Amino acid sequence: MKALIQRLWAYAHTKQFWILAAAFVGGIVFWGGFNTAMEWTNREAFCISCHEMEKNVFEEYRNTIHYQNRTGVRATCPDCHVPKEWGPKMWRKIQASNEVLHKILGSIDTPEKFNAKRAVLAEHEWDRMKSTDSRECRNCHNFSYMDYAEQNSRAATRHQVAFTAGQTCIDCHKGIAHTLPPISQPIGAHKAGEVELPSTAPAKPPASSSEAASEAAPAGSH
């Protein structure tokens, strides 16, 4: 035992030991930094840091049940658009480099440009979700655990038919978090049609006659 300790002590003073130790520590630091960066870019705040996202799709999303609801359980940007598994997540991040390129090129930096490409962008994302069997949707919603007795008759029937037919969430549920482009979509198409997103805040509505009279009255008359 004493001889083993002496050999280890001697090895700890060699150049090879310090190279391996430095590589080990460097690997830990790199991996920690890499994962920190991945998590930082996987936040809603990062997703909407570009005005293209904040002023277009995020404004639409804020008016949906995925943003605010009675239980306070939210589905944020990465919950729907970034896989949770490490491998698919890395591949999605690599694909996102193309989005950085178009940010630099200004491909959708105005409401007009964005709306012109809305259908193409939507179809691309729907195809991605279809190819993964709506993987991100299933983080919260799963046919296998649905209690059809708690659903209204229409929803229960549609879900059971879809489950039997091997359909996936995005086959029916398009346009539930963002404005739906003009497409043929029988379900979830209540917002169909291209829209022009305002570039300025909406004008304040005119005051009612009673409000106008109240504002015009001297302060001491109340």
Image (cartoon, grey):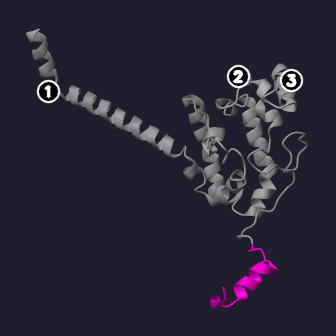
Coordinates of residue 109 in the picture (x, y in percent)? 69, 61
Local SS, label 1: loop
Q: Quadrant of residue 184?
A: top right
Q: Which residue is mark 2?
A: 145
Q: Which residues are magenta?
A: 203-222
Residue 7 lies, with reference to residue 59, above or below; the image says above
Pair 2/1: label in front: 2
**On the picture, is 18 further left or further right than 80?**
left
- Residue at image coords 86%, 48%: 190
Q: Which residue is mark 3?
A: 161
Q: Which residue is mark 1?
A: 13
Type of residue at label 2?
Tyr
Coordinates of residue 66 in the picture (x, y in percent)? 68, 44
Residue 207 lies, with reference to residue 117, above or below; the image says below
**On the picture, is 101 further left or further right than 14?**
right
Mark 3 or mark 2, earlier in chain: 2
- Residue at image coords 75%, 74%: 203
Mark 2 or mark 1, earlier in chain: 1
Mark 1 or mark 3, earlier in chain: 1
The answer to if 102 sits in the magenta stretch is no
Q: Quadrant of residue 85?
A: top right
Coordinates of residue 120 in the picture (x, y in percent)? 79, 47
Coordinates of residue 20 in the picture (x, y in percent)? 27, 28
Q: Quadrant of residue 69?
A: top right
Type of residue at label 1?
His
In terms of depth relative to the viewer, which is nearer, 166 or 146?
A: 146
